[in-house]
Amino acid sequence: MIGVAMYITIKSLWERHKNKSLIAKLTGHDWKTVAKRIKEIEEGKEYPKKKPHPRILDSHKEQIMEWLKDNLSGVRIHEKLREEGVKLGYSTVKDYICKIKKRDNVFILPSRQRKHRLILAISATPHTKEKREKPGSLIRDSL
């Protein structure tokens, strides 16, 4: 199946009166594939939309939100889900947590205050590989 960008490319080339073999050559697709897409374009069909698929963690969303409010990390959430019998990898949990934070505008604030520390910034000069301190290079960083 070709992507939306390629579908639009074929459509725009066809509207500029390019023939099927030239479009196939330019896009790198077989001329039969290009002919099918052109037939769909002429019939007025739009590019098919993807159906939303349920995610494996959607049924556990409330529990994950509770764990996030309790300041559990993604690793601990992954371990707890594994204990409950959910078969998945850590990256699945990490990506899901990231998406629900973005989608639902969730900002989890830790219950304890973060401590601050001072870091000494060190840089290497371009001509020599030795490290030296920059003047006034104390930077305040939060943990």
Image (spheres, rainbow, N blue to C red):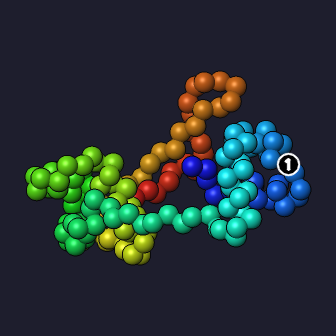
Q: Specify whether 34 is left or right of 75.
A: right
Q: Is residue 69 visible?
A: no
Q: Position of residue 47 (x, y in %)?
A: 62, 64
Q: Is residue 96 visible?
A: yes
Residue in view at x 27 percent, y 46 percent: 89
Q: Residue at x 33, y 64 (%)?
A: 54
Residue 26 in the image: above or below residue 49: above
Instruction: Give the camera-side residue of 92 and 131.
Output: 92
Q: Is residue 131 left or right of residue 116?
A: right
Q: Is residue 38 left or right of residue 22?
A: left
Q: Quadrant of the C terminus?
A: bottom left
Q: Nearer the viewer, residue 142 or 96?
A: 96
Q: In front: 94, or 9?
A: 9
The amino acid type of the residue labelled 1 equals: Asn
Image quarter of residue 129: top right
Residue 119 drawn above or below residue 60: above
Q: Using the rendered view, name the quadrant where residue 115 is placed.
A: bottom left
Disc 1 target residue: 19
- Crowd band around label 1 with a 10 angstrom C-alpha radius: few (<14), some (14–19), many (20+): some
What secondary structure is found at the residue carrying circle 1? loop
Q: How many marks?
A: 1
Residue 131 in the image: x percent, y percent?
Answer: 56, 30
Tell me the residue at 76%/59% (across/down): 11
Tell which residue pokes out farthest to the right in this image. 17
Q: Position of residue 137 (x, y in %)?
A: 55, 48
Q: Does 105 appear above or below 31? A: below
